[in-house]
Image: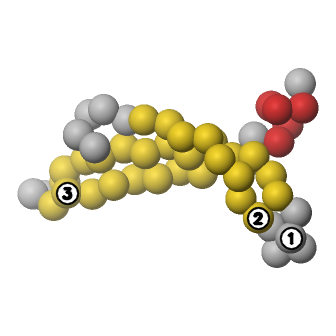
């Protein structure tokens, strides 16, 4: 990953009850105070997939 070049993956996660649901995973690399960091955001896209 390169800073300033975010990317997105799609996959599935499992709930505590064992059911599986679709997710969208956003990754972004950044550098703050000379420290390299990766931010990750996972979003449930069940409603989007149902449309």
> How far apart in space, not on screen, are marks 2 and 3 (Cα)?
30 Å
Q: Where is residue 26 in the image (x, y as percent from the top left)?
A: 50, 42
Q: Position of residue 16 (x, y in %)?
A: 82, 75
Foreground tag (2 vs 3):
2
Which mark sits nearer the N-terminus, 2 or 3?
Answer: 2
| Label 1: element kind | loop
> How far apart in space, not on screen, are marks 3 and 1 (Cα)?
35 Å
- Nearer-the-camera pick, 6 or 20: 20
Image mark for residue 36: 3
| Label 3: element kind | strand
Q: Position of residue 29 (x, y in %)?
A: 29, 46
Which residue is denoted by mark 2 in the rendering?
14
Which mark sits nearer the N-terminus, 3 or 1?
Answer: 1
Image mark for residue 18: 1
Left or right for 23, reference 1:
right
Q: Do the residues labelled 1 and 2 touch (CB within 8 Å)?
A: yes
- Examine the rendering and report whether any part of residue 43 can be seen: no
Left or right for 1, reference 47:
left
| Label 2: element kind | strand
Image: 5 above or below 9: above
The colour scheme is secondary structure
Query: Which quarter of the figure has residue 15?
Result: bottom right
Left or right for 11, reference 19:
left
The residue positioned 19% from the left and 57% from the top of the image is 36
């Amino acid at each position: 990953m390169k800073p300033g070049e975010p990317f997105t993956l799609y996959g599935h996660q499992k709930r505590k009850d064992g059911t599986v649901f679709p997710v969208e995973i956003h990754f972004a690399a950044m550098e703050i105070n000379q420290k390299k960091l990766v931010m990750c955001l996972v979003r449930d896209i069940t409603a989007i997939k149902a449309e």
